[in-house]
Image (cartoon, helix red, strand yellow):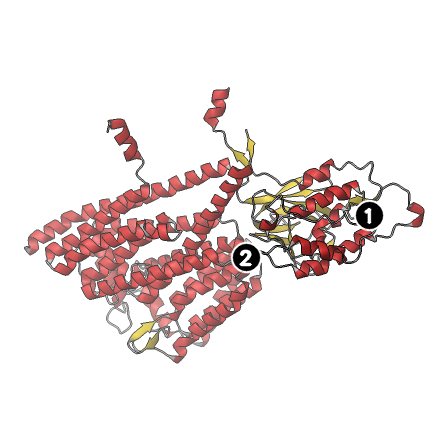
Amino acid sequence: MEKNAYQLLSMGARYWFVLLAALVVWRAGMYLLREHYRRRKILKKLPDAGMVGELRDMQNNRAYPLAREGVLGGGRGCDIRLRGLKRRHVNFAFVEGRGLLLTPCHSRSEIQLDGMNLGKGGYALHGAVLHVGGYTLRVRLFAGLNVPHPAAFQDHWQRAYEDELYAPETAAFTAVPVGYAPYPEMVYENEAADVAQPYEEYEEEAPADAYRQVATMVHATERYEPNQRAAEYAPQMYQPVYNAPVPEDEEDDEPQAFAGGVYGQGDEVDNRQEEQAYLPVQPRYERRRRSDRRRQG
Amino acid sequence: MNIAVKAKKKKQRKPQQMLTGVMLLFFFSAYMLLFIKEPKLETFLMAALVPAALWAVGNVLPRLFPMDRLLLTLINFLCALGVFLQYRYSPARGMTQAFNYGVGLVAMIGCALVVRHIRSWKYLMLPMMAVACGMMALPFVFRAANAGKGATAWVGFGSMTMQPSELVKIIYIIVLSYYLSRRRVMGAMCFIGVMMGFLVLQRDLGTAAIYGGTGLVLLYAATSSALLIGGILAAGVGAVAVLYALFKNSFFLTVQNRINNWLDPFSTYDQLGGGYQIVQSLIAMANGGWWGTGIGNGNAAVIPEFRTDFIFAALMNEFGFVFAVLVIVVYVLIVLRAADIALRSPSAFHTLLALGCAAVLAVQTFIIVGGITKFIPMTGVTMPFLSYGGTSIVSCMGIMGLLQGVASRNEHLLREDQRLADNGGEETA
């Protein structure tokens, strides 16, 4: 093409390219906005999006939404703020397949998870109890999350209630060492599976190796290796519950407070709240549209 | 098929498809215009292949790997524009740039998968920091000849040269995000200091500014402490002043020259290392005017380094001021998208990671556009996605890969939340 003709064409095409670039920017901007509103709409339907459960204060029954990751402390920047705690007390992060990882922010923080010192950190499962400062908090995770759940011990708790030996804070969760989530979820999926009940074989005092057997039986499937570590720790964990010294003069007295729970003579104890606490939490879900509500009047 | 069904079908067209369609039209027209000027088979093939490649990357890639489509489309647009600008002045370089873009895509996918799948970064931090320090020390050992004017930031292996500080940016963002998300501010500041020390020794102040700016953005995002940022800025200015006073005639001679060139480029126009580049760039931009001179009519080749540092001047020369503003808006949209991704991320590490990516892109674009337009002193950094150079494009694409990884993780978590709610969520009125 002739130089002058090309120059003319090229100069005319300038506007075409600017128009196309403007269209690119316009479409991209609209796309950005549309995506933003789409997400906002979804999040409106899912008020608990980004959360994995809640921490419930057992003293006043107040619930704190539990994000996937955050900090528990007394500072303003904390995700869960509780007065009286250090500015940053405990870091928490949900880890798929393991549970809620708790790591203290300071080495001197006195934190207990299910009655045990947290040390450098540990995993809390659904129903675990956390003692932080003066607070007693129960971890409640959403149903459906990929975490090991102590389903094999649920019946055990019921029997423990009946046997009036139940110490909620130090019971089933302490059967495994803190910071360790050994039970694969699949083990408990088969409801018909024969899971041994720890309280069936003895009534008064647990033999030292009783839980070694239980732990072995729980994992005695071909799919999963027996969990040696859990078996090793189990009897030690349970020892304080069974062998807790009962003062002679208070032998027949009212139930005694023990680490936030109650054990001893439990006839008058209202267990409903405790039972409810162990039920999995359900995330909220806004199913109805505004227009539906309007239609319903 | 009746009209209502047709209309419904039309409505269902995805916005991303429209965006890609406009882009394809743009590059097809641009290459065809070049073909009309000089009828070559190669140019004709480019007119067909570039839109086809753009379509494939924009539509096929997100199906194979989880990615943010908008981000990918905008990056594609800028990269293809970079390839076109290189091709317009030198077809061989255009081909090389297209190859670099392919390598960059691989880097982007790799980085996205790493961010998406690595759960614990704890044990990777020390090796990554060691690699970063090792790479930054490379230019002192294998210095490339005739690469990087004034700076010793280039490494030469035979005929191949690379700039390690470009690639270290990826590690830099990850390490800073990790330490700051764990509230280890001192550790992060030490790492920033070490990296800045390397860059100052290399006299690569443009990259040092990018590292410093990104570090400050991340520090502020992690700590919300204006006092800390103010203190660091004051200490930095003090340190620079002291170093400048001590090494004015040796170490900081290049810096001094660049400041002089910025203040009055016309007075040093005919001197070696003077304001020739800036003056030529200003003339080229002024020559372009509002709408440009038109493709193939420009004379940006007179600017030294017009393929790398001054590519924006070449763009303004042929496409004009309005088009250049639209290109900057594309950068702004990428940064906005990155900020959106950062804010959506539920974990502090991923939030800071996405924010770091946005900050690097924003700071780098600001420094180079500001330098070319004489808003700030000119420093030798590349224009993200547009400039010629393998290291630059691989580094930018890698950073975008980090962003893509965070975005896909966010999407996964949102789907997980929906699944939880669908499977057993409590219905609320």
Q: Residue furthest top?
A: A297
Q: Label 1: how many residues lie within 10 Å, few (<14), some (14-19) or many (20+)?
A: few
Q: Nearer the viewer, residue B175 or A56?
A: A56
Q: Is residue B79 above or below residue B187?
A: above
Q: Position of residue B30 (x, y in %)?
A: 18, 52
Q: CA distance from mark 2 to mark 1?
A: 51 Å
The quadrant of the picture occupied by the C terminus of chain B is: top right
The quadrant of the picture occupied by the N terminus of chain B is: top left
Q: Amino acid at mark 2?
A: Ser
Residue at image point 77% right, 36% down: A270
Q: Find disc 2 in the rendering and name its residue.
A: B181
Circle 2 sits in a helix, a strand or a loop, which is it?
helix
Q: Is residue B316 above or below residue A36?
A: below
Residue at image point 53% right, 39% down: B423
Q: Amino acid at mark 1?
A: Glu
Q: Position of residue A28 (x, y in %)?
A: 33, 45
Q: Is residue B367 something one can see in this rendering? A: no
Q: Find disc 1 in the rendering and name its residue.
A: A203
Number of callouts? 2
Share a chain, discs 2 and 1? no
Q: Quadrant of residue A283?
A: top right
Circle 1 sits in a helix, a strand or a loop, which is it?
loop
Q: Label 2: how many residues lie within 10 Å, few (<14), some (14-19) or many (20+)?
A: many
